[in-house]
């Protein structure tokens, strides 16, 4: 399970780093099950309870070296990290490329104009539904609509 957080928002005059928006925490199971949730901040007090709610103890969690994730081993998870200031794939083959790519695709799927902070959860739900039905084989798609 890869976990990561990302800032979603708008850039001032479409230049420079993003200045307004919401933090989003997400996890990606490499079998393509996705979960995204907006959060008020990216502190351990906010993120660890979310992780504990959605993941079973003993789950292998792959993340960057963000300080908020440092207590995951104490919480009962197997925690592997990659230090992005040094490498994108660790010597142990740990990476977060799947979640990073998902952030990119998710950001591209957002409406170009008129996005509001209050609607981000619905944008994420729409992305997940569209992704599920676009990746699903046609026979499964027909059966899921019954």
Image: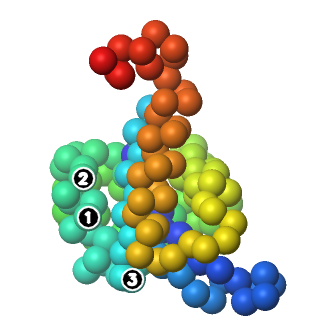
- The reply to whether callout 1 and callout 2 are in contact (CB within 8 Å) is yes
Tell me which residue sits at (53%, 70%) in the image. Answer: 6
Q: Residues within 10 Å of mark 3 (few under 14, many from 20)?
A: some
Left or right of 106 in this view: 27:
left
* Extreme residue in the top direction: 139
Q: Compared to 34, does 138 lie above or below? A: above
Q: CA separation, marks 2 and 3? A: 18 Å
Q: Quadrant of residue 93?
A: top right
Q: Position of residue 75 (x, y in %)?
A: 19, 62
In terms of sequence position, does the residue under pointer 1 or pointer 3 come before the other?
Answer: 3
Q: Nearer the viewer, residue 64 or 45?
A: 45
Q: Quadrant of residue 76?
A: bottom left
Helix, strand or loop for disc 3: loop
> On the image, numbered disc 3 is attached to which residue?
41
Q: Nearer the viewer, residue 69 or 103?
A: 103
Helix, strand or loop for disc 1: helix
> On the image, numbered disc 1 is attached to which residue?
50
- The reply to whether callout 1 and callout 3 are in contact (CB within 8 Å) is no
Q: Residues within 10 Å of mark 2 (few under 14, many from 20)?
A: few
**Res 68 label:** none
Q: Residues within 10 Å of mark 1 (few under 14, many from 20)?
A: some
Left or right of 145 in this view: 126:
right
> On the image, numbered disc 2 is attached to which residue?
54
Q: CA separation, marks 1 and 3? A: 12 Å
Tell me which residue sits at (78%, 88%) in the image. Answer: 13
Q: Position of residue 101 (x, y in %)?
A: 63, 51
């Amino acid at each position: 399970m890869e976990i990561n957080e990302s800032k979603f928002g708008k850039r001032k005059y479409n230049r420079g780093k993003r200045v307004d928006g919401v933090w989003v925490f997400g996890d990606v199971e490499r079998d393509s099950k996705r979960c995204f949730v907006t959060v008020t901040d990216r502190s351990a007090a906010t993120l660890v309870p979310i992780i504990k709610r959605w993941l079973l103890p003993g789950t292998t969690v792959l993340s960057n070296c963000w300080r908020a994730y440092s207590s995951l081993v104490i919480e009962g998870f197997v925690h592997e990290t990659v230090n992005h200031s040094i490498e994108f794939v660790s010597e142990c083959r740990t990476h977060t490329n799947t979640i990073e790519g998902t952030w990119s695709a998710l950001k591209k799927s957002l409406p170009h104009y008129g996005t509001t902070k209050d609607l981000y959860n619905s944008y994420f739900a729409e992305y997940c539904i569209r992704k599920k039905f676009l990746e699903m084989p046609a026979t499964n798609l027909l059966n899921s609509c019954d």
